[in-house]
Image (tube, grey):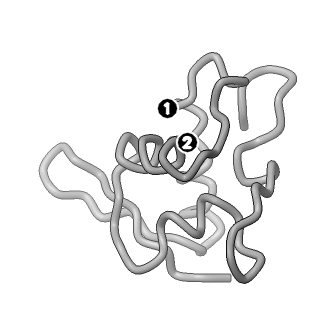
Amino acid sequence: MGDRGQKPLVALQARRPAGSNSLTFCVRRTTLSANELRHRLGREEFDLSGYSQPLATVSVTLRHQVDSGRAKAIRENRKVTYQWIGD
C-alpha cells in the first residue's frame, strides 16, 4: 500500500535492464534495509517525490514482497534487511 491515492511502489514499474522493476533491480544480489533501498532507488533516478512518506512506502512494499514469498526478511538485532528470492 502506498500513500492514499497513489499506486504501490512496485506497481510503478520504473523499468531497468531485463524488464525488472526498480525495487527488484536494487535488491538483487544484496541485502538492504528499507532505508538503504530508499536511498538506492533515489540514486537509480526513481522519483520518490510523489510520496509523502517514501520510507513508509518502501517498507510496506518490502513487507508485501516477503508475504508473497518473493523476498525474505533477515532480522539482526533491531535491523531488518531484505533479500530478493524471486518470482
Residue identifier under label 1:
55
Q: Alpha-carbon neighbours of circle 2 within 10 Å: few (<14), some, or many (≥20)?
A: many
Which quarter of the rendering shows the N terminus? top right
Residue that label 2 marks:
58
> At label 1, which amino acid type do we have?
Leu
Residue at (60% x, 46% y) in the render: 45
Residue 2 picture location, percent across and down: 72, 33
Does 34 sit above or below residue 49? below
Residue lying at the far top in this picture: please name it: 52
Tell which of 20 and 10 is nearer to you: 20
Image quarter where the C terminus lies is bottom right
Q: Judging from the image, what secondary structure is the residue with disc 1 in?
A: helix
Marks 1/2 in contact by CB < 8 Å: the verdict is yes
User: Tag 2, which secondary structure?
Assistant: helix
Q: Name the residue: 47% across, 42% down.
A: 38
Dot 2 amino acid type? Val
Frontmost residue, 58 versus 16? 16
Against 63, residue 38 (above or below) is above
Image coords of residue 21 (percent x, y): 70, 64
> Residue lying furthest left in this view?
77
